[in-house]
Amino acid sequence: MYATKLFANIDALKESGEALPKALHLSPIPSDVIKLHEKRLGINLQSDETPLLAVNKKIIGAVGGYGWSGLLNTNKNIYYRLLKNAFFSSLIAIAKKGCIPMEQVVSLQIGNHDACFGTAYVGHQFLVNGKVLGLLRMGGGIEFDEKLMDILRKLFEDGNSSCTWGNKN
């Protein structure tokens, strides 16, 4: 089952002691990050849900949530708020919210860089079960956070071997 593999990869990353980018939060996730995600995603976590991974807190230029995208992965669901994967998303940031039960997830992937109008970074494609759902911003800076993108790609791997992480230095 994919969820079991993903959860094992998250645990392996936590145990590795690898330095994490500011935009990536692993369990235990600070309460302010959980509250922000609940507000921006329009959700209330159930008592039996444990947040395991959160992507993004602050994004430069995102005012009152406009232009913000993020992910919250719990032991039960993946909640997301993504920007539309369209040419004019850099000008008009239309967000799409959703929830997918973990038992329905076969694969997660970080896809291609956006192809939006202009030179501003909007996000990378976020795929669930091979389908592009929208654009997820990799970090809160002006440019994407390559380390965050690499870590997410590695976490989402569904190969036969577990993820191995760097030294605990």
Image (cartoon, grey):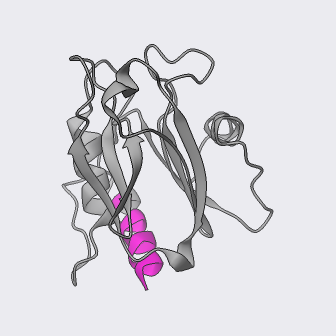
On the question of residue 51 being in view, the answer is yes
The residue that appears at 26% across and 76% down in the rendered structure is 162
The residue that appears at 29% across and 53% down in the rendered structure is 110
On the question of residue 169 being in view, the answer is no
Where does the N terminus fall, quadrant-wise?
bottom left
Q: Is residue 2 left or right of residue 35?
A: left
Principal SS element in the magenta part? helix
Does 4 appear in magenta?
yes
**18, above or below 156, in the image:** above
The residue that appears at 43% across and 38% down in the rendered structure is 84
Does 53 appear in magenta?
no
The residue that appears at 70% across and 64% down in the rendered structure is 49
Tally of marks: 0
State the image coordinates of residue 113 (x, y, percent, origin top left).
22, 39
Residues shaded magenta:
1-13
Camera-side residue of 51 and 91: 91
**121, above or below 5, in the image:** above
Camera-side residue of 67 and 163: 67
State the image coordinates of residue 38 (x, y, percent, origin top left).
69, 42
Quarter of the image holding residue 14? bottom left
**105, above or below 140, in the image:** below
State the image coordinates of residue 9 (x, y, percent, origin top left).
36, 68
Residue found at the far front of this picture: 87
State the image coordinates of residue 138 (x, y, percent, origin top left).
33, 36
Q: Is residue 37 left or right of residue 116?
A: right
